[in-house]
Image (cartoon, rainbow, N blue to C red):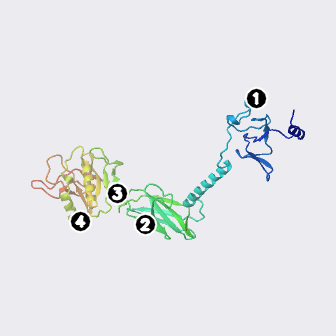
Amino acid sequence: MPKREDEYRAGTKEPRGRGLCPFCGSSSIYYNEYFKSWRCARCEKSFPSPSYGQGKGFGKEARWFGKTTAGERPSGEALIKDRKWKRPTTHRILPSWLAVLLVIVILGAIIGAAGYELGWFSKIPAPSNFDIVSEDRQITLSWTLNEDGDEVLIRFSTSNYPASSEDGTELYWGTGTSYVHSGLINGAAYYYTIWSVRDAEGTLLYSQSRHASGTPVWIGPDGESEVEDVFYQGGYVIGGDGHRIELINNPDAEDPTWDELRSFLAGDETDEQAYTSSFVCADFAEMLHNNAEEAGIRAVYVSISLQVDSESELHALNAFNTEDMGLIYIDDTGTVEYCPCSADKIVTVQVGEEYIPESIFPCQGWSSTWGSLGMVADICIQW
């Protein structure tokens, strides 16, 4: 016979059985008086009313949205076939929206710090007219301070533009408008970055950066550079072995006196080389030029065209602008085999005149005059 309690519940339409969470099936539920709703202590979800069932399971009216263990699943094969069981998520450190918000805040702080360091968000005006002038072993930098007169910071590198106040090497910090960066290597590239800097109660604020780069280079009094090829009659001058004749100039070389030049020629070994198919007059002139420059004597490479009978022949020699005797032409080309003890020769070079070298250091048994090589038709001087 039915119990009196069952008749009472049937009359009042009160559900029978054990109250369960409609989401995960847990019986660990409680009623929240303040919010007037039920809440599950396992999955932490709220719902208006529990699900009720018979015995260990519960009826088809129960709502299952999570996966349970075998012991938590309701009885009844039909219910099991109709549902996809998932394990309930019972351990959540943070709600997903709060985790996303936290990541955004952290990334914002990192980007903001980097942005202020690089001047992305700075309201400090940057310096303007940042310019450089490359010179011999130095670079002159100039700029205009911003309208507030803030100090500037300049840092440099030989590989790339410094990206922050810690990158590269500090070169200048102050309120000036120019700086000479000296002691540099000619031919090497230098990269500069400049910022306006302001001290805001102990915190340094930087403007956006400006960049400039340059390569120091020496330009001689006659437009020569430290290393240069030789050109004549529309092409490169080539040595006996096929290489391009290359002049190496010394920025510190000076014009000699005639006595200083004679002393250098007496000790130099260029004229002692043998003239062969792989070492011709162009090679002799190249060697003497570079040896003189290395010794601190400013030298000139001279290319000429000689008229021999009805044919034109090319020849090379050197010249030196002496302080006491003016421009003197020196021909150090050696001979094929038998030669005097010295092949250092002085020669007068003038268009329309015969090219007749004369020994500077005559040797016993040899004539000091070497004979005419032809008439000078053209002269090209390269400092």
The numbered mark at residue 226 is 3
Q: CA distance from mark 1 to mark 3?
A: 95 Å
For the residue labelled by badge 2, is the local secondary structure a helix, a strand or a loop? strand
Q: In terms of sequence position, does the residue under pointer 3 or pointer 4 come before the other?
A: 3
Q: In terms of sequence position, does the residue under pointer 2 or pointer 4 come before the other?
A: 2
For the residue labelled by badge 3, is the local secondary structure a helix, a strand or a loop? loop
Q: CA distance from mark 2 to mark 4?
A: 34 Å
Three-letter amino acid code of the residue under disc 3: Glu
Image x and y of residue 285, in percent? 26, 53
Which residue is disc 2 drawn over?
180
Q: CA distance from mark 1 to mark 2?
A: 90 Å
Q: Nearer the viewer, mark 2 or mark 4?
A: 2
Image x and y of residue 33, in percent? 80, 52
Three-letter amino acid code of the residue under disc 1: Ala
**1 vs 355: above or below:** above
The numbered mark at residue 257 is 4
For the residue labelled by badge 1, is the local secondary structure a helix, a strand or a loop? helix
Q: In terms of sequence position, does the residue under pointer 1 or pointer 2 come before the other?
A: 1
Q: Nearer the viewer, mark 1 or mark 3?
A: 1
The numbered mark at residue 78 is 1
Q: In terms of sequence position, does the residue under pointer 1 or pointer 3 come before the other?
A: 1
Q: Are marks 3 and 2 in contact (CB under 8 Å)?
A: no
Three-letter amino acid code of the residue under disc 2: Val
Q: CA distance from mark 3 to mark 4?
A: 23 Å
Image x and y of residue 256, in percent? 25, 64
For the residue labelled by badge 4, is the local secondary structure a helix, a strand or a loop? loop
Q: In terms of sequence position, does the residue under pointer 3 or pointer 2 come before the other?
A: 2
Of 203 and 272, the residue lying toward us: 203
| Residue at image location 18% in from the left, 48% down from the top | 335
